[in-house]
Amino acid sequence: MTEPAPAWWHIGQNDPYIIVPFIGYTIAVFVIAILSHRHLTKANFETEYYVGSRSFGAWVLAFSWVATLASGGTFLGYPSLVYSYGWSVAFWVAGSMITAIVGLGMVGKRINRLARQTGALTLVDLLRDRYNSRAVGVIYAVLIVLVTSVYLIAQFVAGARILESMLETSYEMGLIVFAVSVVAYTTYGGFRAVAWTDTMQGVIMIIGIVLLVPLALNRVGGLENATKHLMSRNDPVAVEKGLPPVKHAYLYGPGPEKISKKTAADDKPLTDEPPEQLPPAKPNPWLPFGVGMSLFMLRSIGGIVMPTTVPRMLAFKDTKALRRALMLLAPYFILMYGSSLITMNCAHAIGLDLPPGDSDRAVPELAKIIAPPVLAGLLIAAPFAAVMSTVDSALLVISGSVVRDIVHRTFIPDLSQRSMKRLIFCVTGAAGFCVFLAALMIEPAHLQPLVIHYVGASASALFWPGMATFYWRRTTGHGVTAGLAGGLVVYLLAVVFRPFGSVFPMHPFIYGFVGSFALVILGSLATPKQPEERLRLYFGASRSERGL
Amino acid sequence: MTPPPSDRDARQARHFAQCVREAKFCAAVWIAAWVVCATIALKFGYLPPEQRPDEPWLILGMPGWVFFGVIIPWLILIGLTVWFAAAYIKDDEPCDPFPESKADTAAPTKEAAHD
C-alpha cells in the first residue's frame, strides 16, 4: 500500500533553500513595523494610525491595494481551479481585466477628496458625516466587522498551515505563531506598517507566480502541446458518476463536472437498490454561463468598496499618486492571473496528477517538479505574503470599525488618545483571538469559496450605498440604511434558496446587488431630501443654481 | 433661505462634475468589457458538445475564444487604463475643509488647478 501524498504545506520541510528566504521575509516585516512605529509617535496618532497621514505615493498605493485584494485564494485557490477545470476558468477570471480601472478610477479621487475635507479616517466616517446619522455608521461598521471576520478565518488557516511546515510544528502552534506575529506588527505599526509590508508582499507575489511560466512552458514544449494534452483528457468526476464523456470539456464552458469534497459516508448509496437500478446521475458542470457572467461583475466591482481596500483610497497624497498607481496596476492583474492560467494548464501535460478535490496543492507540487529550490522558497513565500497582507488589512479594518466607528464616534466622543491606543491594542488582540479560536474549530476545506462569499457579501451590501453617497444628491440616510441591511439579507437568502437555480443559475451576489440598488433608490425617494446647504458641501452648487 | 453659491461651492461643483465624467468613463468601459467578453464566450466558448470541432481553433496555444474573448480585451484594457490614468483623469483643485469638520492638515492637496 502506498503512503498518502503529503499535503502541500509540507513541501518545504527541512529545506534550507526554502526556510532561509522565508525567515528573511519575516524579519523584513518586523523591521518595517518598527520603522513605521516611529511615524506613529511623531504625527497625529489617529490620522497616522488609520490612514498613514494621507501621505502615500503611487507605489505604496498600487501594491498595497493589490496585495490586499489578492489573498491566499489567489495563489492557491485560483490555480487549483485552473488545474481542475482547464481553460473554462478564463471566463471565470475575465472580470479581473477591469478591476484596476473600476476599483481605483471610479471612486478613488472622490473618496480621497471628501475624506480630506471632512477629516474622515474610515469609509464609515464618510457615510456617517454625509447623513449625520449614527444608525448609518453603526450598521455599516457592524456589517464590516461581520463579513471581514468570516474572511479572516480562512486566511488564518492558510497562514497557520504554512508556518506548520516551516517550523515543523503542530497546526495549533503554527496558528498561535501566525496570530501573535500578525497581530503584533499590525498593532505596533498601524496602517503605515500594513501598507509598507503590503507593498513588499505585492512585489514578492508577482515575482513568484510569473517566474513559473517559462519553467512550465519549457518543460511541456509550448502551450499548444499542453492544450492538446487537455483535449484528450477524460473528466475523472464524470467517469466516477457514470456520465458520458463531454467532448473537449477542458477547453470550453461550462467546463468539466464540478468537484465536491465528499466523505466516505457520502459515497454510500442511500437505498438498498443495486447501482444499475438507481437513477442516472445528472450533469453538474462547474461554470454555467449565468454564473460566469455574474462572477465577471463580481470580480470587477468587488474591489471598489471592499472594506479592506477602501482605506487605501483615503490615504494617498494626491491625484498624481492615483494616476501613477493605475498605470502600475494596469498590467498587474494579467500577469497575476494570466501566469497561473498558463502554468496550471500545463500541469497535466507535465505529469502532475492529483486526485479530484485535492488540487489546492497544485502550485507547490508543480513548483517541486519544475522549479529550482530557491524559487520554490519564493513560491512558498508568495501565498504567505498574500495571506499576511490580507490579514493585517482586515485586522486594521475591524479595529477601526469597533474603536473609531462604534466606540469613539458613537458612544465615547471624548475618548483620550491614550485610552484609544489601549483600546485599539485590546480590540485588535481580541479580534485576532476570536478568529484564532474560530480557525481552531472550523477548518475550511477550500479557501476560494469563503473569499468569493466575502467579496459577494461586501459588494451586495456596500456597493450601492457607497456609490450613492458619493454620486447622488438625492440619497438619504434611510435609503442607505435600507440598502446596507437589505443587500446583505437578500444575499444571504439567495445563498440559501438559490432562486431560479434550475432555470438560469447565477451567483447569489446578483440578487443582493439588485436588491440593494432598489432599496437605496426607494428608501431615498421615500424620505425627505437633505438640506441644500448640506448638499453643496459635497456636490457644490447645483446646475440650476449655477444657471446651467 | 439658501444663501447664494460661493467660490467654494463652484470649486466643489467642478470637482464633482469631473469625478462624474471619470466614473462614467469607467462604467462605460466596464459594460463594454462585460458585453464583449460575455458575447464571445457565449458564441464561441460555450458551444454544445456536438457542435465542438474535432480540432479546436488554437491561437498561441490557447482556445480561440479565450484569445479573442479574454486575452485581447484584457490587453486593450491595459492600454486604455494607462491612457485613462495619463490623460483622462484630471488633477484636483485644492480642497477646502468643511466648516464643521476636523479635517486634518497633515498632507494637504497642493495640486494646480486644472481648468
Image (tube, grey):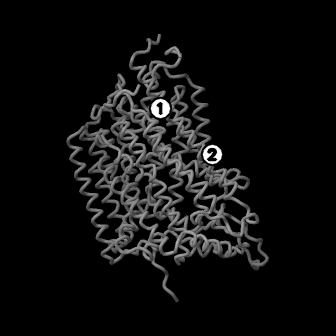
Q: Amino acid at mark 1?
A: Cys
Classify residue B92 by image quadrant. top left
Nearer to me, A529 or A413 = A529
Callout 2: 10 Å neighbours few (<14), some, many (20+)?
many
Which subunit holds the residue at mark 2? A
Residue A452 in percent (x, y) is at 53, 54
Reply above or below: A78 against A266: above
Q: Residue at x 36, y 43 (%)?
A: A400
Query: Which residue bears the numbered disc 1?
Result: B19
Would residue A468 appear left or right of B43 to someone viewing this image? Answer: left
Marks 1, 2 in one chain: no
Query: Which residue bears the numbered disc 2?
Result: A511
Question: Any mark on residue A296, and which?
Answer: none
Q: Amino acid at mark 2?
A: Tyr
Q: Residue furthest right?
A: A277
Q: Residue furthest front?
A: B60
Reply above or below: A76 against A415: below
Whether residue A333 is visible to the viewer of this picture, yes or no, is: yes
